[in-house]
Image (cartoon, rainbow, N blue to C red):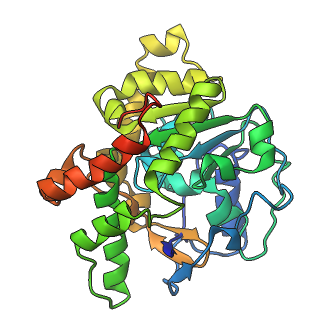
Amino acid sequence: MTWRLWALSGSSLDFAGLHSSDPAVMLLISRRRKGLKIQGPRTGGVIINSPSALWSPTHASPITARPSDAVVATLPKSGRTWIKALLYATVRRREHPVDSSNHHLFHYLGPHECIKFFEYQLYTVNRIPDLDDLPDPRLFATNVPFASLLRSVLKSACKVVYVCRDPKDNLISQWSFANKFRVMDGMEPLLVEAAADFFCHGVSPFGPYWDHVLGYSRAHLAHPDQVLFFRYEEMSRDPAAHAKRLAEFVGRPFGAEEEEASSVDAIIRLCSLDHMAGLKATKSGTTEIVLRAVDNSSFFRRGVVADWVNHLSPKTARKIDAIPEARFRGSGLRV
């Protein structure tokens, strides 16, 4: 099984109004001091055959998780960019007020630079960064199944945030994303029927969709205070309620004054896909993941619930639905 990795670089920035103790801001300042630009040339694509090439729970934990840490552990193309934005804007709302006009960090960095992946950005190319000096709460991300989380994360009381999306929409979003890179690399786009066949055979990034989702669902049921389980479709219907639950879960609840000031609604507007897609960091920025610089705009698609109806035949849709229905039987989980 193979999958494609993607990543960022940047451009000259105005740092006025940015909180310098924030890890993401420190990254920007460090780049500027080194004379680096935040918008660099595109490098060649990378294909890896095994997640163990970058990240393996069988190795000694390179990081000691803290109870205050939060880890986004969502499958690609399941609302991961959105939940990262919501988490970062919520946790860092005092350092980066939503009403800070053009000085909010999202104008300079995309969500995947604000909350970095263990296996794609932090521990890559034999690099072992020192994360001990990062201020609490530290925010990280991963793609691995629950059973493959680092032992340190599993044993700690840190918070794990997971978003589950309808498998058909997840497939279509992954198919669209992958085809962008196939075309860039001079390859023929993959037909949606072929992509659906791969998906039904469990050939997906980080293992079969149903195993990944079921693993985190079971962990949520067993440890609801440590694992938060959202459904993308429910988030789309009531984003404010989910933002409040997220804030409470990570120990940053909104106070009465914030509620009266409509702070929750302001964060929802800031992090909406339509708004984020129009920011300079999205339109002209990139994100470094392993060895490739990827346009931030690639991470923003339509995000529409049930968009699969525009791409899949009823027969293929039924075939996809039948698999998680059988695999989830008895678990109480429905997607």
Horizontal side, residue 285 vs residue 223: left or right: left
- The reply to whether residue 113 is in sight is yes
Seen at 57% across and 26% down, the residue is 221
Residue 335 location (% of width, % of height): 35, 38
Residue under the point 66% across and 48% down: 147
Image check: 63 left or right of 143? right
265 up-or-down from 171: above or below? above
Residue 103 position within the rendered picture, expressed as x and y whole percent measured from the top left: 50, 45
224 or 98: nearer the viewer:
224
Q: Where is residue 266 in the image (x, y as percent from the top left)?
A: 40, 29
Residue 40 vs residue 309, the one in the foreground: 309
* 137 or 199: nearer the viewer: 199
Q: In which quarter of the image is residue 301?
A: bottom left
Q: Residue furthest top?
A: 256
Residue at x-position 44% and y-position 59%: 281
Q: Which residue is drawn at 50% across and 16% down?
A: 258
Can the viewer see residue 98 in this picture? no
